[in-house]
Image: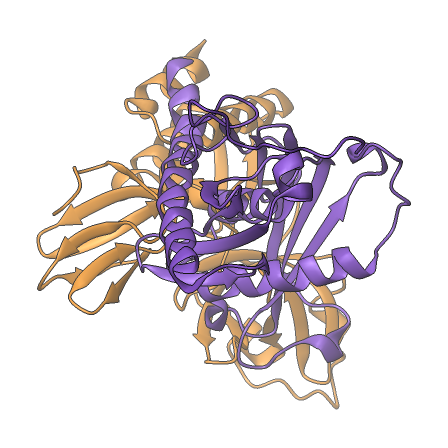
């Protein structure tokens, strides 16, 4: 590598030369691997990536997202998922079975303004986004408080192997749904718990690039 | 502007403001100064003051302007009414429309537009105070703002002008040199890719002067590049010091 581990890099900066695997946030230019975005360089084995510090959410297959219904079409809904592209969720992909729309109307399932936790099942080359709800997603969600943070900070909110998120839920007395698109739903045991956890999440967003964050957030929640 | 200037370079080889021919004005850039834009930068080049902002990539409206295979880069260059000596009439002009166009073309090659079909990235450069070299100031600031917005780019774009006064090739013309000098050549340059993305010129250059002017401007761009990097780096080191 031509740069230090965790070094701050700017777009176009040379990261390494030769035979490497490309992770997110890098591109190849002839023999060189360069940073695509401003961020922190990171290498695991032969794989180089740049952890972005800023940027809007760009959908990727398999991402869990929280979206808001903004429109419907003949067999489902269009969801705002906080990216330049809306996500399409068909009614059968929501309930995971065939639905006879002669017998049922769409608004029995979802209406404009509803929030949905879903998975991105497909992204095509024209950035048409298809969503689905499997048993791992909640589908329509109700109650709770929805907050939005910078999507590039979401990995810190989840933590290594989910350490931060499980700590937030246990110590903060709440249930959390975290979308890769920067939207987070919080259900606290009490109103104060909700407030506190939201404050903690905003703190993570603010200090995302610093170390020892989990312990500091735990201390904050226990106060 | 008043009196004609008879001599731009004195006996000691110094310019009107005491600079060496190959020295640029002081350049300061600060990244991420606007809360609400996705990316932003404030820049001072000598007496120039510019703010650049970036929004996007976001959904393109009106939809008929969408490109199905790439994002559209919309660039707006604008001078504030109070940026010049005689109040500038607000609103677009022939000049600002042209500069918006060449600035867009200077930035486009650096941005991975094909990653975001149907989207738009809006870039605006507002000149608060102008004193020769505003387009280069605008492009340099816009490039920092794009990086600050996390937009995928092949390289930064660094921009500076060179020119000719008293038959000498000089870097980064100041107002008087621009108005009464004998040539002006703004460039924009991708320092890592070593590619020019903007080359304009007015006045007359001999072929060897032309070569010299380009080489000097490229050298200048590399200095600009270092300032751009510092600006982006400083934004994050500042937060870390808070701890």
The residue at the far top in this view is A223
Identify the hue of chain B. purple
* Residue B130 shows up from this direction: yes
> Considering depth in this image, is A54 or A208 the residue closer to the camera?
A54
Quadrant for residue B228, please give it: top left
Residue A61 image offset from top left, x and y in percent: 40, 69
> Considering depth in this image, is A113 or A100 the residue closer to the camera?
A113
Residue A128 image offset from top left, x and y in percent: 54, 77
Quadrant for residue B169, please give it: top left
Identify the hue of chain A. orange
* Residue B111 shows up from this direction: no
Q: Which residue is found at the position 62% from the left and 79% from the top?
A: B67
Q: Which residue is found at the position 41% from the left and 26% from the top?
A: B234
> Considering depth in this image, is A123 or B91 the residue closer to the camera?
B91
Residue A31 image offset from top left, x and y in percent: 15, 66
| Image height of A124 relative to B20, above or below | below
Q: Which residue is found at the position 17% from the left and 41% from the top?
A: A3
Q: Which residue is found at the position 67% from the left and 76% from the top?
A: B66
> Considering depth in this image, is A215 or B230 the residue closer to the camera?
B230
Residue A213 image offset from top left, x and y in percent: 33, 24
């Amino acid at each position: 590598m031509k740069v230090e581990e965790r070094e701050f890099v700017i777009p176009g900066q040379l990261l390494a030369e030769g035979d490497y695997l490309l992770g997110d946030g890098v591109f190849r230019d002839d023999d060189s691997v360069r940073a695509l975005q401003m961020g922190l360089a990171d290498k695991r084995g032969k794989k180089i990536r740049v952890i972005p510090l800023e940027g809007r959410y760009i959908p990727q297959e398999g991402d869990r997202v929280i979206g808001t219904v903004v429109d419907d079409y003949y067999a489902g809904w269009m969801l705002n998922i906080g990216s330049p592209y809306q996500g399409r969720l068909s009614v059968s992909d929501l309930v995971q079975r065939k639905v006879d729309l002669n017998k049922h109307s769409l608004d029995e399932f979802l209406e404009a303004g509803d929030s949905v936790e879903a998975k991105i099942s497909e992204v095509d080359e024209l950035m048409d986004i298809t969503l689905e709800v499997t048993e791992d997603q909640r589908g329509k969600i109700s109650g709770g408080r929805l907050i939005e943070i910078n999507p590039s900070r979401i990995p810190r909110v989840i933590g290594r192997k989910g350490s931060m998120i499980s700590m937030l839920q246990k110590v903060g007395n709440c249930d959390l749904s975290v979308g890769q698109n920067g939207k987070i739903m919080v259900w606290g045991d009490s109103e104060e718990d909700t407030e506190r956890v939201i404050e903690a999440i905003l703190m993570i967003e603010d200090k995302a690039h610093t170390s020892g964050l989990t312990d500091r957030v735990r201390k904050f929640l226990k106060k | 502007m008043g009196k004609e200037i008879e001599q731009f370079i004195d006996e000691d080889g110094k310019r009107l403001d005491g600079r060496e021919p190959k020295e640029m004005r002081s350049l300061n850039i600060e990244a991420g100064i606007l809360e609400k834009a996705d990316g932003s930068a404030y820049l001072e080049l000598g007496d120039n003051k510019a703010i650049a902002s970036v929004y996007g990539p976001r959904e393109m409206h009106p939809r008929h302007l969408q490109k199905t295979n790439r994002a559209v880069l919309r660039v707006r260059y604008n001078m504030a009414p109070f940026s010049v000596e005689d109040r500038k009439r607000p609103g677009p002009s022939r000049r600002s429309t042209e500069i918006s166009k060449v600035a867009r073309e200077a930035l486009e090659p650096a941005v991975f537009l094909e990653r975001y079909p149907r989207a738009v990235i809006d870039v605006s450069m507002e000149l608060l105070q102008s004193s020769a070299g505003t387009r280069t100031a605008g492009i340099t600031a816009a490039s920092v703002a794009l990086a600050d917005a996390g937009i995928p780019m092949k390289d930064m774009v660094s921009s500076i002008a060179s020119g000719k006064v008293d038959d000498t090739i000089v870097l980064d013309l100041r107002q008087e040199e621009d108005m009464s000098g004998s040539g002006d050549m703004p460039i924009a340059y991708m320092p890592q890719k070593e590619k020019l993305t903007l080359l304009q010129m007015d006045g007359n250059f001999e072929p060897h002067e032309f070569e010299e002017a380009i080489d000097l401007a490229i050298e200048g761009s590399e200095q600009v590049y270092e300032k751009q990097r510092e600006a982006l780096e400083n934004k994050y080191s500042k937060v870390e010091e808070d701890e």
